[in-house]
Amino acid sequence: KTNNGLVMVNFYSDYINCFPNNISEPANGTLSQVADHIDYIKEKIGIDHVGIGGDYDGVDTLPIGLEDVSTYPALFAELVKRRYTEEDLMKLAGKNLIRVFMDVEKVRDDLRSQEPLETLINQTTWENLPCRTDF
């Protein structure tokens, strides 16, 4: 929120259906749990900072009811039941992402005259830092 950025809600079931609220076995989450995550982020930082990043090409388990992008209308129908406005849905569907990328392009333009940094980072600085969650 501070940098006017975006949290993309990932559909990976191990993120959606995780302890202490996991409700199903096997671990596939549900469409309703994804909507719960969207609700949570919206309540914490506002609808302007939430997006949908299903990660269909990067995960092996997906929530029941969100198996592919053709199921997005079902997710949006669930959000309508939760009193999301048409404007809220437009922001989730891409309006927020477009806003962020417009801001990124402004930064690009502001930094255009600067040369890239070519400072090497010492390997010991980063080699033991995790860059992803391990399950």
Image (tube, rainbow, N blue to C red):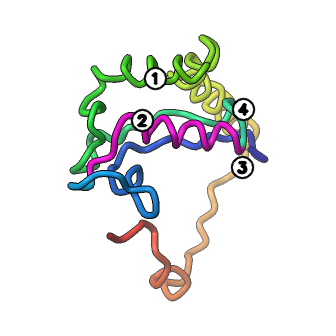
Residue 50 belongs to magenta span: no
Helix, strand or loop at mark 2: helix
Per the image, the residue denoted by label 2 is 32
Using residue 36 as the reference point, say whether residue 74 is left or right of it. left
Quarter occupied by residue 113? top right
Query: At which x and y percent is residue 105?
Result: 65, 32
Helix, strand or loop at mark 4: helix
Q: CA distance from mark 4 to mark 3?
A: 14 Å
Per the image, the residue denoted by label 4 is 106
Residue 78's disc number: 1
The amino acid beneath tag 1 is Glu
Query: At which x and y percent is residue 124?
Result: 51, 88
Q: CA distance from mark 4 to mark 2?
A: 37 Å
Helix, strand or loop at mark 1: helix
Q: Do the residues under discs 2 and 3 have CB atoms within 8 angstroms?
A: no
Q: Main secondary structure of the magenta part?
A: helix
Q: CA distance from mark 3 to mark 1?
A: 47 Å
**In-front residue for pair 127/77:** 77
Using residue 99 as the reference point, say whether residue 129 is left or right of it. left
The amino acid beneath tag 2 is Ser
The amino acid beneath tag 4 is Lys
Per the image, the residue denoted by label 3 is 114
Q: Pick out the residue farthest to the front.
A: 23
Q: Which residues are magenta?
A: 28-44
- Reply above or below: 114 against 75: below
Task: Mark 4 or mark 1: name the one nearer the start of the chain.
Answer: 1
